[in-house]
Image (cartoon, rainbow, N blue to C red):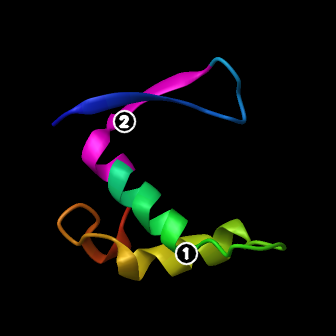
Amino acid sequence: MAQIEIENVGQPGKTYRVDAAKFAEMRRAVLACLPDAAPGMTPAALIEAVKPLLDQALFPRGDTA
């Protein structure tokens, strides 16, 4: 399982090591769901929108999404 280091934008300077495949899959799904114009989406709406787009091998039933 390959890991990458990401920075938390809410806590500048704070980094985390995460699974690279899961990060890439979540990034792909989030970018596919976000609208091009304002006002955007609430976090709750975004979570529900990405779940059906996620690879079931990485996120079974959308768990841990």
Q: Toward which corner of the image does residue 53 lie, by quadrant? A: bottom left
Point 34% across, 71% down: residue: 54
Could you tell me the amino acid type at mark 2? Val
Which quadrant would the C terminus be assigned to in this image?
bottom left
Point 76% across, 72% down: residue: 40
Which span of residues is magenta-colored? Answer: 14-23
The local secondary structure at tag 1 comes to helix
Query: Which residue is disc 1 drawn over?
Result: 33
Residue 63 is situated, as x and y percent measured from the top left of the image, at: 36, 67
Which class describes the residues within 10 Å of circle 2: few (<14), some (14-19), or many (20+)? some
Query: Which residue is disc 2 drawn over?
Result: 18
Is 53 above or below relative to 43? below
Could you tell me the amino acid type at mark 1? Cys
Q: Is residue 65 visible?
A: no
From this viewpoint, which residue is outermost toward the front?
36
Left/right placement of residue 23 relative to residue 13 reads: left
